[in-house]
Image (cartoon, rainbow, N blue to C red):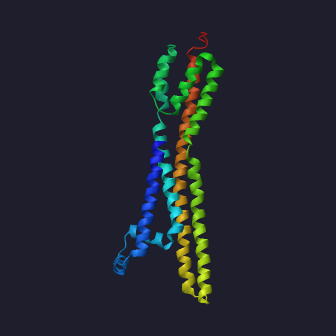
């Protein structure tokens, strides 16, 4: 949670910084600098110029959407990488303790292991003395709670994927309206007015679509990692229940 907050704050600060830089360039850039940059502009300068051409008030929401979406996506990826463990190794480690009927030792190993699989097995062992049905329900409830933690923040990333093109289309529609106003003032449909204006106004739509594509790639990658972890959780739960049954824990009436 702390890491997510830090990433979001850094993203907002970065977006404000970009806004200040581009606004300053748009209003205070000297003609000599313009001629020098036009000769061989770098990639950074090209992106900045496109940002200015798309009008800062319309491009800024798209930029904020990108930064916030990337911040949440990176936070989720880091969290999921830490949550993903070798569940089969954990089961092999606790199997001798379960066979020996020493659940306390097995629970301690689960406490010292991070990730949703270890948490789920720990809850199952805590409820094991109350019967097999209670243990299975406890494992299921713990698994559902862990899945909610794994998917936290994904709704926001999905929202940003939807908002980015909307912001882009909004900027384009406003830009088209302004082009028609210029045509009305000029009293003539000049090709230079229409073509030049439309080229600039479409920048917001293109930017919004690019942001949506980038965030969609991150979103699908995160979903695939969650699916892998959920599969490990389900497989680990089945193996753990089988292990408890084969150990004779319930056959010996250890309730």
Can the viewer see residue 245 in this picture?
no
Can the viewer see residue 44 in this picture?
yes
Horizontal placement of 208 versus 27: left or right? right
Q: Which residue is drawn at 52% across and 60% down?
A: 211
Q: How many labels does the image show?
A: 0
Measuring from the top left, give residue 200's x and y in whole percent: 52, 75
Nearest to the observer: residue 112 or residue 21: 21
20 shown above or below 148: below
182 shown above or below 230: below
Q: Residue at x 59, y 80 (%)?
A: 179
Measuring from the top left, give residue 144's x and y in whole percent: 61, 34
Q: Residue at x 39, y 75 (%)?
A: 28
Nearest to the observer: residue 15 or residue 164: 15
Q: In the displayed image of the protein, which residue is found farthest to the right?
A: 133
Where is residue 242, by image quadrant?
top right
Measuring from the top left, give residue 164's x and y in whole percent: 56, 61
Horizontal placement of 188 versus 102: left or right? right
Quadrant where the C terminus lies?
Answer: top right
Q: In the displayed image of the protein, which residue is found farthest to the top?
A: 252
Nearest to the observer: residue 152 or residue 220: 152
Q: Residue at x 43, y 53 (%)?
A: 10
Measuring from the top left, give residue 210's x and y in whole percent: 52, 63
223 shown above or below 233: below
């Amino acid at each position: 949670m702390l890491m997510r907050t830090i990433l979001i704050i850094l993203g907002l600060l970065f977006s404000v910084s970009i806004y200040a830089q581009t606004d300053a360039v748009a209003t205070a850039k000297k003609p000599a600098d313009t001629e020098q940059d036009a000769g061989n502009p770098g990639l950074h300068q090209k992106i900045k110029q496109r940002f200015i051409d798309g009008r800062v008030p319309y491009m800024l929401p798209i930029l904020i959407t990108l930064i916030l979406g990337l911040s949440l996506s990176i936070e989720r990826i880091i969290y999921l990488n830490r949550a993903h463990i070798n569940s089969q190794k954990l089961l092999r480690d606790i199997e001798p303790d379960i066979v020996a009927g020493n659940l306390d030792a097995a629970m301690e190993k689960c406490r010292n292991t991070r990730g949703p699989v270890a948490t789920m097995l720990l809850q199952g062992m805590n409820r094991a003395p109350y019967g097999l049905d209670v243990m299975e329900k406890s494992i299921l409830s713990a698994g559902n709670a862990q899945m909610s933690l794994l998917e936290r923040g994904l709704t926001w990333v999905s929202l940003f994927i939807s908002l980015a093109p909307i912001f882009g289309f909004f900027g384009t529609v406003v830009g088209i309206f302004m082009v028609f106003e210029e045509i009305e003032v000029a009293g003539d449909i000049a090709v230079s007015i229409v073509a030049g204006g439309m080229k600039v106004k479409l920048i917001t739509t293109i930017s919004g679509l690019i942001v949506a594509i980038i965030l969609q790639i991150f979103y699908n990658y995160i979903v695939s990692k969650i699916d892998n972890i959920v599969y490990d959780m389900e497989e680990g739960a089945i193996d753990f229940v089988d292990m408890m049954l084969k150990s004779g824990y319930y056959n010996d009436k250890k309730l």
